[in-house]
Image (spheres, helix red, strand yellow):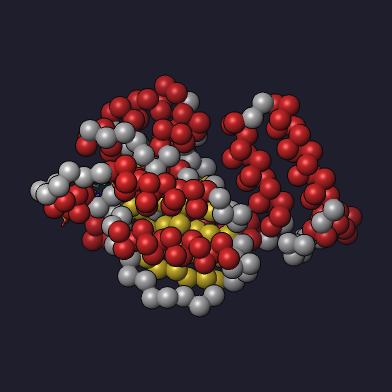
Amino acid sequence: MTRPEYECIRVESVGAVTRLTLNRPERLNAFNVAMHEEMGDALMRVRADRTVRVLILTGAGRGFCAGQDLTDRASQTQGAALDLGASLERFYNPLVLSLRSLEVPVIAAVNGVAAGAGANLALACDMVVAARSASFIQSFAKLGLVPDCGGTWFLPRLVGPARAMGLALLGDKLGAVEAAAWGLIWRCVADEELDTTVTELAARLAAGAPRGLARTKQALHGSTQHSLEQQLLIEQDFQRELGRTADFAEGVAAFRDKRAARFTGT
Ligand code: T3D
């Protein structure tokens, strides 16, 4: 994949794994317009690149992402009234939907504090692995705002309504250990193990059957809107489709031959 030069993010690929790093460490990787535009472009390229099998999202420096860059807002509130709805409509909502609708598994490697939209961006990923020193903060309450970037949708689904309400109304810091214990994230690991853990996880996912993983994501993400009857029909349709793939035949052959499967995405 040929890539443009980005200023606010870094994109690197090793084999089938692409790593996208939010790269404004002096502001704990807070979002400005340029970062949004670069993310939009990078995610579009990831989506179009059939060689990418896993995406990792992480942050440069000591933070994961501190949400919206508030220095931009501080200067803007001096003038005309701000339309934050327009900011969500133009940037954050497309970002969440773009990330969420990628076919490949997306891992958030949360290396440090994830605050505001930064916390919810992590939750929009398929699997979240956090360093022990990382934390998650729904900072919105401290600004008189509502959790955005999907926060009001992800939180109750991940941790239940009582904990979602507490996190959202108080805006307190939730450490990674507790976040894992609450089921907000997949795993919390020692800081020095984050890279290795995420690299190994990405390698495992990259070796998986791409179409099966894509349909699994789709089925799970959509399940909250469906009845059991509807969901059973979706599983039936997806299984019918996947049962006809070369990857299913390969999976069965690998089981028979007692070897690792070599999935091709066909
Ligand atoms: O506006 C819209 O478009 C609507 C959408 C809104 C989405 C949102 O995300 S709203 C929520 C915005 N984010 C926050 O409210 C978080 C603000 N930051 C913090 O509360 C703290 O920085 C943290 C708890 C995240 C980390 O605290 P700490 O003590 O570890 O670090 P620090 O010293 O506060 O921050 C380090 C530097 O990053 C510092 O710069 P300095 O003083 O060294 O030059 C700080 O100002 C900067 N920084 C941190 N967060 C932001 C930021 N700069 C701009 N915007 C930030 N969000």
Q: Residue at x 43, y 39 (%)?
A: 150
Query: How many numbered badges does the structure rendering display?
Result: 0
Q: Inspect this view and state whether residue 108 appears.
A: yes
Going by the image, does 136 lie left or right of 80?
right
Which residue is most to the front? 80
Q: Report the residue at 16% width, 51% height from top.
A: 76
Quarter holding the C terminus is: bottom right
Q: Name the outermost residue toward the left.
A: 78
Q: Residue at x 31, y 48 (%)?
A: 87
Residue 3 point in image, percent of width and height: 46, 75
Q: Is residue 92 left or right of residue 129?
A: left
Pick out the residue farthest to the bottom: 2
Residue 199 can be seen, yes or no = no
Q: Residue 172 lies in what quarter of the image? A: top left
Q: Position of residue 104 (x, y in %)?
A: 60, 56
Locate the N terminus and report the quarter of the image it occupies.
bottom right
In the visual, does 147 lie left or right of 182? Answer: left
Q: Position of residue 228 (x, y in %)?
A: 70, 26
Q: Which residue corresponds to the image point at 49% horizontal and 61% vertical from the top-left?
A: 43
Name the spot of residue 185 as percent of width and height, x first. Answer: 48, 41
**60 lies above or below 132:** below
